[in-house]
């Protein structure tokens, strides 16, 4: 009888084990299919980066933003010394130079509003051209306080514009598939230019005075304006037979 009484318990335990095996989660049959998709996505990003680097427009933008960043960095460091050399008190020179930070916000607001009505490349090129004229004319204007303030204001509107313009232009042309890598490729020489420009400007000032330095800054802004417009009308590059997006 004890043997017969144990049978229901063994049957119950066997049923529980069978149910546990039935409900045990199985390895998803979809996981192997996801790996090729991930590899395809990596391949798409790599193709997008290669297409961007072979695009002439990309290198025009690189020249533009490198030249502009060098000009902004050099002006930021040497503006106070230039204004003092023109006979302005150090306090006034520092105050006028401080306008650059305020005007960087103004430039961003102007760019945001203007791009709703005009092509972005045209707006950026116009800002860079204004800076080129202001930088080259500043030695002629800075003899008076009004001229110094006016020249710095005209130049300072372009401060901060590149931080908005670069992402917008890159994303518009190359999409967001490999945006981080493409932007990093552009930012590397830009960062080097920002670091080297003040030293190069100091060496140029020692040779030619501030007039030559400001002329070089204005020339760099002019190069930036030309680079923004260069090849702007060409179609975006293709990756795998489709436009990058």
Image: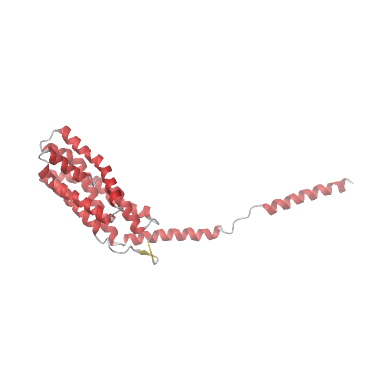
Of residues 227 and 35, the one drawn nearer to the viewer in this rendering? 227
The residue located at (69%, 53%) in the rendering is 21
Residue 121 coordinates in the image, percent (x, y): 27, 56
Looking at the picture, the colour scheme in use is: secondary structure
Of residues 115 and 160, the one drawn nearer to the viewer in this rendering? 115
Of the 4 image quadrants, the one containing the C terminus is bottom left
The residue located at (72%, 52%) in the rendering is 19
21 over 146 or under it: above or below: below
Q: Is residue 221 left or right of residue 50?
A: left
Q: Please tell me how many numbered marks the rendered image carries.
A: 0
Of residues 155 and 179, the one drawn nearer to the viewer in this rendering? 155
Residue 201 coordinates in the image, percent (x, y): 17, 45
Residue 164 coordinates in the image, percent (x, y): 31, 49
Q: Is residue 149 left or right of residue 35?
A: left
Residue, far right: 1
The residue located at (19%, 50%) in the rendering is 130
The residue located at (52%, 58%) in the rendering is 34
Is residue 48 in view? Answer: yes
Residue 205 coordinates in the image, percent (x, y): 13, 44
Residue, far front: 117
37 over 106 or under it: above or below: below
Q: Quadrant of residue 91?
A: top left
Is residue 209 in view? Answer: no
């Amino acid at each position: 009888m004890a043997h017969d009484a144990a049978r229901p318990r063994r049957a119950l335990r066997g049923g529980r084990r069978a149910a546990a095996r039935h409900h045990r989660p199985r390895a998803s049959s979809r996981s192997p299919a996801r790996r090729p998709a991930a590899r395809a996505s990596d391949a798409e990003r790599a193709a997008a980066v290669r297409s961007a680097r072979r695009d002439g427009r990309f290198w025009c933008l690189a020249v533009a933003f490198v030249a502009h960043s060098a000009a902004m960095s050099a002006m930021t460091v040497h503006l106070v010394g230039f204004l003092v050399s023109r006979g302005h008190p150090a306090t006034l020179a520092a105050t006028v130079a401080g306008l650059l930070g305020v005007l960087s916000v103004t430039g961003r607001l102007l760019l945001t509003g203007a791009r709703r009505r005009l092509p972005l490349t045209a707006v950026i090129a116009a800002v860079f051209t204004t800076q080129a004229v202001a930088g080259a004319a500043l030695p002629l204007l800075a003899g008076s306080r009004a001229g110094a303030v006016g020249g710095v204001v005209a130049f300072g509107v372009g401060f901060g514009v590149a931080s908005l313009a670069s992402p917008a232009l890159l994303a518009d042309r190359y999409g967001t598939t490999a945006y981080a890598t493409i932007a990093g490729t552009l930012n590397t020489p830009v960062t080097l230019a920002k670091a080297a420009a003040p030293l190069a400007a100091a060496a140029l000032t020692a040779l030619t005075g501030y007039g030559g330095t400001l002329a070089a800054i204005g020339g760099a802004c002019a190069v930036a304006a030309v680079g923004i417009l260069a090849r702007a009308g060409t179609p975006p590059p293709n990756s795998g037979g489709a436009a990058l997006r």
